[in-house]
Image (tube, rainbow, N blue to C red):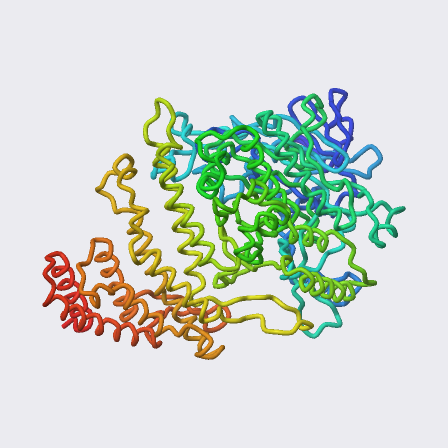
Amino acid sequence: MPGMGAAAPKPGPKPFKEIITDKAVTKKGLFTVHKVEDKYYFEIPDSLLGQEIMAITRFSKVPGGAGIYGGEMANQQTLKFEKGPSNNIFIRTVTLISVADSTQEIYKAVNNSYLNAIATAFDIKALGKDSTSSVIEVTDFFKGDNQIVSINPNVKRRLNLSMLASDRSYVQSINTYPINTEVKTVKTFITAPSLGGFGSGGFPAASDAGAVTIEMNTSLIILPKKPMQQRHWDKRVGYFPDNFVQFTDAQQRVEDKNFAVHWRLEPKPEDMEKWKRGELVEPIKPIVYYIDPATPRKWRTYLKAGVDDWQKAFEKAGFKNAIMGKDWPENDSTMSMEDARYSVLRYFASDIENAYGPNVHDPRSGEILESHIGWYHNVMRLVHDWFMIQTAAINPRSRKMKFDDELMGQLIRFVSSHEVGHTLGLLHNMGSSSKTPVEKLRDKAWVEANGHTASIMDYARFNYVAQPEDNISEKGMFPRIGDYDEWAIQWGYGYIPGKDEEEQKVNSDKMIVKAISENPRRWFGTYELGNSADPRAQSEDLSDNAMKASEYGIKNLKRIILGIPEWTKEEGEDYENLSDVYGQLVGQFNRYMNHVLRNIGGVYETYKSTTQTGDVYESVPKATQKEAFSFLNAQLFQTPTWLIDKTILNKIANPIANERVQTIQISVLTNLLDGTRLNRMITSANRFGADKVYPFDELMEDTRKAVWSELVAKKPIDVYRRNLQKAHVEKLIDLAYPTVQAPVMIAPGFTISIPTYKNTDIASMAKGQLKAIQAEVNAAAATTIDRLTKYHLQDVAERIKKALDPK
């Protein structure tokens, strides 16, 4: 018709051959991937629609300087593809909050309450040859900055990354395999250096180019159609938990479904009955960790040994050859370290003194799918310093700045075992070392046979209690996989009988009660589950008595401080080594003080089921708390002059700064009188009985007498004690007239801020202590002949007067 334009192109899919031409390079796998010139297409079978897929995006290569390394995770998201209403395919993100069985009526209510977001939509370019699949173009999706396959927004903010430069971003390759598809991209982000300098975030390279280029890999791995059977999470065995809310028609209240995170380790069908009978069998699929080929060759054997050391624990669960470390097959082009099917220990050329062991798991069941352990090159410096400071008094091999390769290899091995433990699902067990009696740490036969802690998952680095005369070998100094670890793997991976979940839960409880009663070293300390008041569950400590253990530790530090000027010497070097090692020694002393401090006002927390007798919460005995106070007074408040070694300090520290000992004294005193601790002591006296606890008023009275003991002895007061006494007065003033506002929840979702101590006995007692000190210092100032002591006492008296009567 005149005046009419050409007919609009017919919407909808085109014939397959028009899109996937003869020029296409096709690869078959989870998705069939077609590359036509510079465009990539996914051919998605209808059978895959609605199935949950994990998208795991990792950095492959990054600029230096921002603390991010190739192999580390950038993002993780569960998603699913589904057909839209207009010849399109949606990607929905999946957030698992609540579930219900599809056969029950309440399933409809759950579905009506939660709607997953549509993250993106693709036009269907063509249907597959048999019309049971859909072809979509994914080039722009993957090369763009789509959140579900790009960098987590929080990480982007930390790295100062803003908009994507699309002209400098592209898809490098897409490969596909039976259960996963791997997408490698190069993305360039516009950015600017951090205003706070490179230490505040961002890449230094941005200062030159105004942009950074990052190579990334996204693994799309299909989750099992049938999720692994969950293992009920129990607080008495330390596994990482996951959870969702479970709805059923029969329930009268909503159930929080908590389950343990662990690998799917199953016997072969023909071995199932043998395994149930307790016979050793091989799993269908063992757990394999590959060692990054970027790892220096001389350390690979030790890293693999750290993996293989877990084999004996898995034998307790009924599996042989269940876990192993392997070298990465460098000549196999079909394997990629970013591929989510492989677990890899990635080696980072970094000055960070650390290593870490994460895992990626199915949120529906807790099944671990893969893990990339992060290993920073400079972790060797960390373990060197730990080993020197904690064992040099009894071990000549640790008295030098560079250890021989065999010793460093063994240190690497123990860290490897610890990080692998996390990737198996295990939390830290900081309470494990408390199950070793302190004197057993000096018993050569016992400690060499059993180890100084029952768990490699503890932060119980080395045996700092052993004395030179004990003649303990390195076997009695190193942590190892112990009684708790073997039990935890047995519980998490072994057979628990029961025809259904409830019966298994009951049998699990019986197993746990029996196991811990038979061997108390299988106890799990609840350090990471919220209670910071239990002195048995602390990091870096040893034994069942922190006071005795720390006293032995200090004896060794007094030996070590005499040796470090010689041990740290290296030809042509300055005193940097001495400075570092002295700092580590002071840090170790500080740990001892804080280990002891936790006992004062401490509360034991021992999780139990209703089938067990006894209370969950108990006060630390009064005698133990008083022992802790006496230790702090003797070892810290009475200035530890042995630690102020002027022959060392005059070589490493300018005297313009406070001495580190003074900082520790004031920090521990301030924490001792912390309002949270004092409130807990008041509540404990009411809960457990005033005769069974250390009353808070008695603590405050003991503190005043200890800190101001010179007034009774009528002695001059040295500079350390003068500063400590001023800090004591300032802390009491803070307690008497609190200004800190603390949020207090008075109803779910509703908090108010009130002064923390204003309406408690703490403020009253603090004022009473200030008045007592005021009277004592006024009397002492009138008689002392030491000028600095007099001025100090007059100053303190004036501060108290102004606090008590500000008008």
Is residue 738 visible to the viewer in this orientation of the structure?
A: yes
User: In which quadrant is the N terminus drawn?
Assistant: top right
Q: Position of residue 179 (x, y in %)?
A: 75, 38
Viewer-side residue, 628 vs 205 = 628
Q: Residue at x 64, y 33 (%)?
A: 338
Is residue 744 depicted above or below 284 in this figure?
below
In this rendering, would 540 be left or right of 130? Answer: left
Quadrant for residue 803, please give it.
bottom left
Viewer-side residue, 322 vs 192 = 322
Viewer-side residue, 155 vs 365 = 365
In this rendering, would 694 be left or right of 252? Answer: left
Q: Which residue is drawn at 43% across and 32% down?
A: 203
Q: Position of residue 449 (x, y in %)?
A: 64, 47
Q: Which residue reaches farthest front?
A: 469
Image mark count: 0
Is residue 4 visible to the viewer in this orientation of the structure?
A: no
User: In which quadrant is the C terminus drawn?
Assistant: bottom left
Quadrant for residue 480, please give it.
top right
Viewer-side residue, 731 vs 315 = 315
In this rendering, would 642 be left or right of 37? Answer: left
Q: Where is residue 784 in the image (x, y as percent from the top left)?
A: 12, 63
Quadrant for residue 657, please give it.
top left
Q: Residue at x 55, y 66 (%)?
A: 605
